[in-house]
Amino acid sequence: MAHPFSRRSFLKAASVAAGGLPALGHAAQAADDPAKAIRDRIALSDLHYAEPPRRSEEGLPIGNGRMGSLVWTTASQVRLQINRVDAYPAGSASNSFNEAHNDYCGGCAWLDLRFEGRPFRKGKVALHLSVYDGIVTITGDGVKVEIVAAREPDVFAIAIQDRRGSAVTATLRALRYAPSSTDANGAADTHATTLRTRSHLAVTRLHAEDAAIALSQEFREVPFRSHTAVMAAFASGAAESELLDEASVALIASDATTLFVSSAAGFGDDGDSLATARRALETARTAGMPALAQAARAWWHDFWDQGSLALHSADGTAERVQRDYHYYLYLMAATSGGKFPPKFNGMLWNTGGDPRAWGAQHWYTNTSCYQEALPASGRLVLTDPFFDLYSAMLPACRAAAEAQWGSQGIFIPETVTFDGPEPLPPEIAAEMRALYLSRKPWAEKSPAFLDYATTKHPYASVWNWKTPGRWEKGRYLFGERGHGPYGPTSHIFATTAKIAYHFWLRYEFTQDRAWLAERAYPMLRGAVEFYRHHPMVRLEADGRFHIQGSNNSEPIRDARDASEDLAALRAVIPALLRAAALLDRDKALQPAWRDFLDRLAPLPCSDDPDVLGADLLHGPRTLAAARGPARYFNPDYVRAEPHTLPVWFFDLCGVEARDTALRDLAQATLDRLVESHGPASKTWNNGLTKLPIAAALLGRAELVRDLVPRQMGALAAPGALANTPLLRNRLSLGEGAQAMSAQHLGRASEALQLALLQSAPPAPGEDPILHLFPAWPTDWDADYRLHARGGFVVEATMTRGAVTRLELRSKAGAPCRLRNPFPAAVTLQRDGRPAETLTGSLLSFPTRMGETIALIPGK
């Protein structure tokens, strides 16, 4: 639906606030044609290719949230790989993927559209992605192709105009080649191929019907089963199907106008993917291309009407940041409408079949790059798959807390399959606890434990102490990292608390008590109880709870008092206490939780006598990564940590934080890192780094100006080192082959939002304070609609360093606390009528659900 804000009322308020002058140049245009203004704003994010993509990974992305593909061309073909977010060939109990990078997910089939002649040769082809409409258009010599991803059903509708009257061939090809299967009588079955990977079977079947073709996949590893299907048919006219070989089936039409391509996926006996794809195809053919295209356009137009940014700077950098921000939102909308969130390593954009670097597991840190900017954008619905993923694995995570660690609550590993941690046999779990808690020397692990580990994936957190090995006489011999049971992700505990805090933040953005009770509270409680009962969390002689033997992210292993753990607990425990009070739950446990919080070990600092890497931390007192000793640490991480310093986050030291001493420490730490990296550091381009976010949180506009566009790839300063050159479609291959990534766009988008608007509380678990433009360069103009905690939608404009317009809508009727952005008293207009006048630095006022409030500064 269209957003309830009236654009005209906002512009009228802006004119009043600015003494009759429009806030930005485009604002005046918007008053005459708001729809055109939004369309033109979003169109800056379009992709335009005047020549063929140089490689398939540079194709144009299109998707409906569940199925997606890049679109690329050769001289005679338009090509796609049909991928799905719910296509998982193996689960957590698999014994077949014990080598790095060899598990897979997402892929369903290749689709090739072949035209006679060479209509898309260089000099004759142009490709265009309309981000506003969600449509890919390809024009060639006498040929035009338009591709729409229907929102419902799961269908790509491909309109074909060939003025030459030539035949078109649509071919579905298998993603893997394997020998033909045999039927029940042992005869060759040319319609099916089977590929065995140890205990895992991947069966591909080709289907040639009178006027349709299909390719289905089935994956089995007892007791796991999953399946996918892709089906294609032309809208009308004569079409002839043909089995080309064991791996491809074609459909040839002489007068093609529209091709419909459907897909489906399922698990176990959860329906029949081929039948589901067939129903989707028939629904699409009945509806027709015009109706599907119109519905898709309407969906995208409503999506963009939910909020956007208009940015301006004299050198055009702000406009490029605006371009990449909206492109990030497009990518998320195209991949985040299914049962599972998009994988960080490829999303729905794989083009090379099954292989992808890092395989099929979900890394939380990487996934968070995509998720954390969505709530403030107003697109909470796009976070549903993320929350559903982790909610669904709660039973497995409860079992893992006990089996792996001898604790209570829940344990969510940093790296985990879609169905959660693997259930462990009791004898393996018992030995694992003894080994991983250092109760049994690593050198004494049993042959049974090693034999069990042999078949397990080395990227699964629980087995992450393994390294790639070698095959010898038919047996796979894995290596070890040399740090006992400690691998990069094996002992990361903070992921559990971080994910729980995401559930709390969603409540803060919505004020939805049902969500708090049913979804967030089990996560919060489970995370705190996991730490509180963990054998490595001990009350020591100083009267403080210290955490032994955990990892601080990947580069520090088996340390003491890791800052990730201590910072996360300082956020998640207050959130749990606030939630328990709101829901009137666990009164008997609340004193224990509060005592746990009050007696947590202090955050590690550079001048602590036992700080890790003390000889590397010189200069002013700063925050540090952990206390020592550590079994392993990367000195560069301690000296100039490139990925995350968690104390900056979790609402501990933003611009409204009450703990000013901690905020000063965070500022000093940021200064040290900026100085140590220097202007040419590739760290600023890194897709994982949260340094731009830290700069925004701490109100550092001078750093935001440089770091946000640099991370997005919108700015390449002289001498800067690119971490990984971006492809023409603004995706990165920094994660490896066939692992196309938009992590850099997600991280930078979060930093951008925080520079424009913050809504953090003075301390975790308290009420938020809205703070406008806390880190925005004063010579950059901005006009935005963003969402804030407390259930507020905020529209604001800054022109030449002054706030010229501010209007709020209260979605939940919560009290509003706002840092006064104007130099004088403020008059509130409630639903267009003047109401009270407020003064002071911090404005507090009640709101009603659905109420719109404009804040007009006094003269």
Image (cartoon, rainbow, N blue to C red):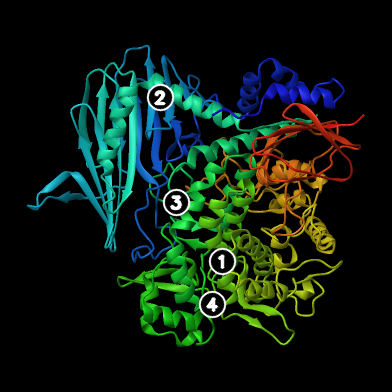
- In the rendered structure, the answer to whether residue 232 lies left or right of residue 770 reads left
Q: Name the residue under label 2.
A: 292
> Which disc number belongs to residue 482?
4
Residue type pointed to by label 3: Arg
Q: Earlier in the sequence, mark 4 or mark 2?
A: 2
Q: Mark 1 points at which residue?
A: 525
Residue type pointed to by label 1: Arg
Residue type pointed to by label 4: Gly
Q: Nearer the viewer, mark 4 or mark 2?
A: 2
Q: Which of marks 3 and 1 is in front?
A: 1
What is the crowding at mark 1: few (fewer than 14 residues within 10 Å), some, or many (at least 20)? many
**Residue 524 x/y as whole percent:** 58, 63
Kindly state the secondary structure of the residue where label 2 is placed.
Answer: helix
What is the crowding at mark 3: few (fewer than 14 residues within 10 Å), some, or many (at least 20)? many
The quarter of the picture where the N terminus appears is: top right
Is 786 drawn above or below residue 412 in the view shown?
A: above
- In the rendered structure, the answer to whether residue 324 lies left or right of residue 759 reads left
* Cα separation between marks 3 and 2: 32 Å
* Cα separation between marks 4 and 2: 57 Å
> Which disc number belongs to residue 356?
3
Q: Which of marks 3 and 2 is in front?
A: 2
Q: Are marks 3 and 1 in contact (CB under 8 Å)?
A: no
What is the crowding at mark 2: few (fewer than 14 residues within 10 Å), some, or many (at least 20)? many
The quarter of the picture where the C terminus appears is: top right
Q: Which of marks 4 and 1 is in front?
A: 1
Q: Earlier in the sequence, mark 1 or mark 2?
A: 2
What is the crowding at mark 4: few (fewer than 14 residues within 10 Å), some, or many (at least 20)? few
* Cα separation between marks 4 and 3: 27 Å
* Cα separation between marks 1 and 2: 45 Å
Q: Which of marks 3 and 1 is nearer the N terminus?
A: 3
